[in-house]
Image: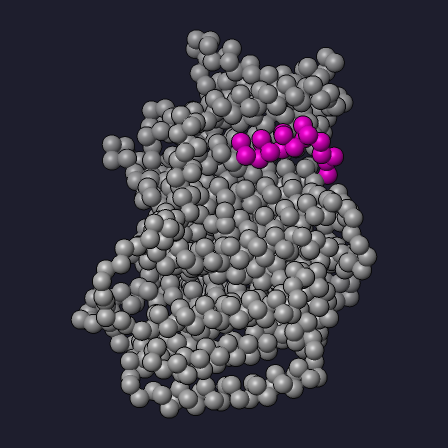
Amino acid sequence: MIANLVFLVLAGGLPYYLLLERRRGMHPKYIFALSALLLLGAVVLSLELPNTHAPMMVLIAFVNAIFTLYRAAKTTNFYKLGYYLIFLNAPFFILFEEQGAIYSVSMLVSLTGIFLIGRFYEKHYGSANYHYITGVTLATPSIATLLTLYLVALALYPPLPNALFFLSHILNAEPNLLWYAVVITLFVGNFVLAMRVMTKTLFGQPNPNIHYVHLSSGETMPHVAVLIALLALSIIGFQEVIL
Amino acid sequence: MYLRSRFFKAGCGVERCMEKFVLLIPMIPILIALILGFVKNKEFIPKVSIGLSGLIALLALYGTYFVMSRDTAIEGFGGLVIYNELSAILVPYVAILGLVIRKYAAKYLWDEAGYQRFFILLNFIFSAIYLLVMSNNLIVLALAWQLMSISLYMLVSFNVGSKTAVSNARWTLIIHKGADLVFLFAVILTYKTFGSFDLGVLSAEWLEMSHSPVENPMIFVIGLLYLIAAMMKSAIMPFHIWLPYTSEAPTPVSALMHAGVVNVGGILLNKMAYLLLLTPAVLNIAFVVGLVTAIFASLVMLVVSDIKRSLGYSTVGQMGYMIMEVGLGAFSLAIYHLMVHGIFKATLFLESGGLVRLARHESNLPKRLSYELFWEEKLKSSSSKLFNYIAFFTILPVVAFIGIKLVLGEEFFHFNASIVILAFAWLTGTQLFLSFFKVSKSESLKVILALVSSFIVILFTYEFIGLSLEHFIYGKDAVLFYEAATLNVTLAMSLAVIAVIMIVGWLFMYKQHFVDIPGERVPISHSKWLFYKLLVKEGYYFEILRLFRKEKR
């Protein structure tokens, strides 16, 4: 029971971000980083401890996911979006037990990319808020390409790994009503959030009041590492889903 | 090593297994996209794209030759991918269409921002289409299905700077994502019910099951889910709204969409043909939905004010026709239809720019060969002899042909529901025929001969080409599809329906081609006005959506 609760908290099954957001000095960047680290901890723990959960735990995480989806649909901040996505996907980790762990790893890699983009925006445009940074596709194609890849991965489109692990796990599961609710919510929720970012920042005309900046070579290297990780995970994902 | 062992059978060297390279077709566009990412010189982008795409076309043609000459499919990657009869027809078609579109786009988009991005995205969608056609595994099919959705969205919203383009592309995204979800559930339920993802294994099992009554209601649900997914991708009502509103996409994208992408529903249903054998109810639903879509969309096409939306609805109508053919068990006919429609519609889109350019320099309609053939001939007064020759030489031999066939082969009218296809084919043919020749109310015999001749021409075309495709793709199993799809319509009823359609069509042609002196102004009846309004408002689709949004506020 205690182990279940630990997993529930670590994986983001409870919306502890509500408490953290109210704390002074708790920048969304730190909440993002903390949530990601806790989820990673849950993944590591799941290798050692049995990760089986009662349906009640899944239900709690599912309700939390719905609430988080509602909050995430209103945000235009990359950091906030990052940790909202962690909490949104918590039911998947809890429902799919060991298999959910690798999906979470894949999601964390994609979110690392989002984190880097958020940091880039914060450094060059003042904050990680993308609301007024429109037309990135036309202004800075390299950033747009990277952001598109991360968003497409988060939106569960193949051949990127999130979709492959998602597909692999749902094909091998025994569906029940709660299972269907979780799968549909995650499938639609991830898609809605990711595509929302795409239409708001990637598309449209560039904002004439903003001086758009291209990626420097130093800033490109972490993204290359993320892309290599995504490629490796895609290969693993293909093997998992086909075999 | 892993890929090599799955790709080649043991002991199969490169020289002996050349045909296996055909199976690499879905991956080649991805490689092209990666290469294009590193090409800096703008002039090389179309050259690289067209050159390497030409390789795909050659491979596809070689694969088709191999399948036809050896009468065997090419399988590889552990049975995940197959180049069978269906692939042999569709992959060369898509490959050649891709070459034409790339060639067109090379100049058309030269001055547009995102020239390189366009060619990269184009390769992703072609990869998805090839993979979808060649997949022999439901998981691979699901991956291709979803890859196509995102690739199409990125292409349709290519003009990222335009608010309306991005806003309208959202419909494409939402409906295609819905199709992805429905398809995934169908795949999950298929695996749970039949225990396999392999389409070859599943098709054999379904064929075996078709010999005895099917009592599992889950099979109907699975069939219905596949049908709904196909309807969403192929813009069948009520999921049609995404297609007419993608007019701001670049012309090459419109050509690809109307000629290639929108056909995936028909391709999916062909892959699931043996499953649909077990679900006659689903086939009947497909027939009704297809029929309603074909009629309604074709009517809306006539009244919308926007030419591109009109073309969009034209395609929706043709897709309805295609689904209707599937609903009647004529799966191969649907393939033939989608190919012919695709070529026709792509030509229309790709020609439109040139036509506009010519019109700007000409005081009258631009004179082109198609104009001279299809319009000027119509206005000549002395076309009656040629008309009579054609009417005579089509009707007479075919009357003899039908007579012989009726005596020797009763199966010609065995599948009564198929006669409904012929009726609609006749409607199409009549329009084509009458665009060549001018006939009027005063030339009753000519009108009758024109209608009957056009019917016979279409009958021949569908009979020979449709049957050839049917025998090639499905062999003897094709008969089973017609039996499953039959609407239990008697021969007398179907002939009566045909007669009604012909009489209504005849009256319509008379009214259309007779120019009367306008007499007293007759007020339009209220019911006609309401019907017209329904069409102009495209079925009040957006009004209903706005109603939901208002309630939400």
**Up/down of B19 relative to A24, above or below:** below
Taking the view exactly as shown, the residue that stands out farthest to the left is B363
- Seen in the image, is B489 located left or right of residue B196? left
- Seen in the image, is B366 located left or right of residue B511? left
Nearer the observer, B414 or A104: B414
Nearer the observer, B549 or B544: B544
Nearer the observer, B181 or B427: B427
**Residue A224 appears in the figure:** no
Instruction: Determine the residue positioned at 47% across, 64% down.
Output: B342
**Up/down of B277 relative to A63, above or below:** below
Residue B60 on the magenta segment: no
Residue A181 on the magenta segment: yes
In this figure, what is the number of numbered marks?
0
- Seen in the image, is B505 located left or right of residue B17? left
Q: In which quarter of the image is the C terminus of chain B?
A: top left
Instruction: Determine the residue positioned at 67% across, 77% down.
Output: B69
Q: Position of residue A12 (x, y in %)?
A: 59, 20
> Of helix, strand and loop, which mostly describes the magenta segment?
helix
Q: In which quarter of the image is the N terminus of chain B?
A: bottom right
Taking the view exactly as shown, the residue that stands out farthest to the top is A24
The magenta stretch is A172-189
Task: Determine which quarter of the picture holds residue B160.
Answer: top left
Instruction: Determine the residue positioned at 55% across, 79% down.
Output: B460
Q: Position of residue B60 (x, y in %)?
A: 58, 68
Q: Position of residue B453 (x, y in %)?
A: 48, 81
Q: Position of residue B223 (x, y in %)?
A: 67, 50
**Residue A162 appears in the figure:** yes
